[in-house]
Image (cartoon, rainbow, N blue to C red):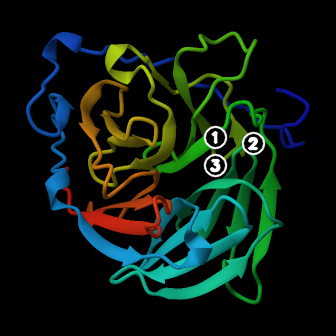
Amino acid sequence: MRGDQPTFTAYFCPMPYLPLSLLLALLCTCGPALLPAQETVDLTKLELLVRLPDGLAEVSGLTVQGDDLLAVEDEHGLVYRMKLANGDLRTQTKFWKDGDYEGIEAVGDEVWVVKSTGTLYRILGQGTAGQRVEKYNTWLTGANDVEGLGYDAQHHRLLLACKDDARDDGRPREDRYVFAFDLDTRVLGEEAVFVIDRGEALEDFAPSALAVHPVSGALYLSSSVENLLLVLAADGSQLGLYELDKELLPQAEGLAFGPDGTLYLSTEAKGGEPARIYKLPLRP
């Protein structure tokens, strides 16, 4: 355990690497799916939920908590709480000082936020007079550029997706990695639990958001570079690769699932258009 980990005794047995095998021979050039998908994603059914205010122009993360949709942006330490039904803004509450916040995830009554450096913030009583925040430093740094945060309920852990790979860490720099933060021990494992093998089809894939399907357990990762949506099974095998519409989602930076499997996707403001959130009904 490195010196910047939380200072309490904990034990964590990391899962082994789960490399992806890209089936390039099965590439499809007709329709939105670039690879055959066992978990079908019909991006033609995207529905606009809301155009976001200027304060959320740089929206970087989404999560669903009850009847609310929560968001963060990558400049200020604020949590924005909106109505899930229509995206109307209810509250915006400060939780920490300004910084590059890239993901948010609700775990029961708790709300977790991740910074691009890999620092995690546990918010208790979010938005109430008794709000309390705990900070957890991890061994990740800004060189890893954490951009995605999701909750893996089956293993009771948070998943952190890195947009980049730090130099001299012993891992192939051409791949991209997802690490797990154990919610019981409050420690980030040093072995990647998912490895994205960036072969020809994923050559420029750089995770910008992450969400876990609440029923199937499939892992959804967006990449604002090349506008892609990658779907992985819980064992790391690839279920599908899709192109996102650049007109609708020019800078896809947020993913979240509702309990019914509805997928919410956000894009930052770009090209004179405001930031927006779309929804897409999905079935496991």
Name the mark on residue 183: 3
| Percent coordinates x, y for residue 18 in the rendering | 44, 19
Give whichever of discs 2 and 1 has the lower sequence position.
Answer: 2
Tag 1 residue:
146
The residue positioned 69% from the left and 36% from the top of the image is 188
As drawn, is 120 to the left or to the right of 264? right
Measure how far apart labels 3 and 2 are at the Cα level: 19 Å
Q: Secondary structure at mark 3?
A: loop
- The amino acid type, in three-letter code, at marker 3 is Leu
Give whichever of discs 3 and 2 has the lower sequence position.
Answer: 2
Marks 1 & 3, CB-CB < 8 Å contact: no
Q: Secondary structure at mark 1?
A: strand
Q: Secondary structure at mark 2?
A: loop
- The amino acid type, in three-letter code, at marker 2 is Thr
| Percent coordinates x, y for residue 246 in the rendering | 33, 49
Q: Nearer the viewer, mark 3 or mark 2?
A: 2
The residue positioned 84% from the left and 37% from the top of the image is 5
Tag 2 residue:
117
- The amino acid type, in three-letter code, at marker 1 is Val
As drawn, is 69 to the left or to the right of 130? left
Answer yes or no: is residue 109 visible.
no
Q: Nearer the viewer, mark 1 or mark 3?
A: 1
Q: Quadrant of residue 174?
A: top right
Structural crowding at the residue carrying mark 2, measured as other residues with C-alpha within 10 Å and reported as few (<14), some (14–19) or many (≥20): many
